[in-house]
Image (cartoon, rainbow, N blue to C red):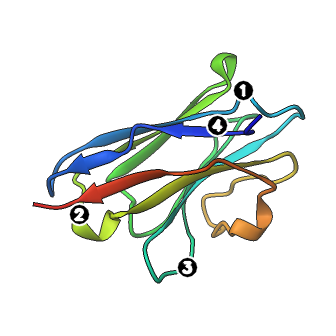
Amino acid sequence: QVPLVESGGGLVHPGGSLRLSCAASGITVDYNAIGWFRQAPGKEREGVSCINRSDGTTYYAESVKGRFTISRDNAKKAVYLQMNSLKPEDTAVYYCAADPDLYCDPGTIISALDFGSWGQGTQVTVSS
């Protein structure tokens, strides 16, 4: 069973919005941090946002601050990424990832190396 399942990707015009969902029901161990990453063709995987299951503290990359909002529903073991004012440079495959030990901090950039469980990704394309 895949630990995490992303959904909500698609094609949107510049300035539009999408809401990504991450279902963590396949995780069999306790986790604290869930992060969103993205990877565009030919580029490294970039940390976008992160939220703690424990206290809801969040982290955002500078490139998405003010446009993206991460939220959680612990009862549903789900995390969401509301993406507004989308730009062509937001085009990428978006992945969610979870880790039992990581604590998301607003001032600490997240790394893919910090997360142990991953989903398979959902494509987001921003184009006119």
Q: Label 2 belongs to which residue?
A: 87
Image x and y of residue 104, in percent: 70, 53
In the rendered image of this protein, does residue 23 appear above or below residue 50? above
Find residue 116 and report its image quarter: bottom right
- Look at the numbered disc 4 and give the secondary structure of its residue: loop
Task: Select label 3 or label 2 by which is in front.
Answer: 3
Specify which label sits upstream in the sequence, 1 or 3.
1
User: Are the residues flagged by discs 4 and 3 in contact, CB closer than 8 Å?
Assistant: no
Amino acid type indicated by mark 3: Glu
Q: Amino acid at mark 1?
A: Ser
Residue beneath label 1, please?
A: 25
Give me the C-alpha separation between circle 4 and circle 3.
27 Å
Mark 3 Cα shell of 10 Å, populated few (<14), some (14-19), many (≥20): few
Is residue 84 among the parts visible in the rendering?
A: no
**Residue name at image x 61 percent, y 29 percent:** 78
- Image quarter where the N terminus lies is top right
Which mark sits nearer the N-terminus, 4 or 3?
Answer: 3
Which is nearer the eye, 83 or 122? Answer: 122
Residue where numbered disc 3 is placed: 44
For mark 4, what is the residue?
Answer: 56
Which residue type carries mark 4?
Gly
Query: Could you give the CA–CA distance between mark 3 and mark 2, rounded to whole angstroms?
Result: 18 Å
Q: For the residues marked 2 and 1, what is the alpha-carbon distance in whole angstroms? A: 31 Å
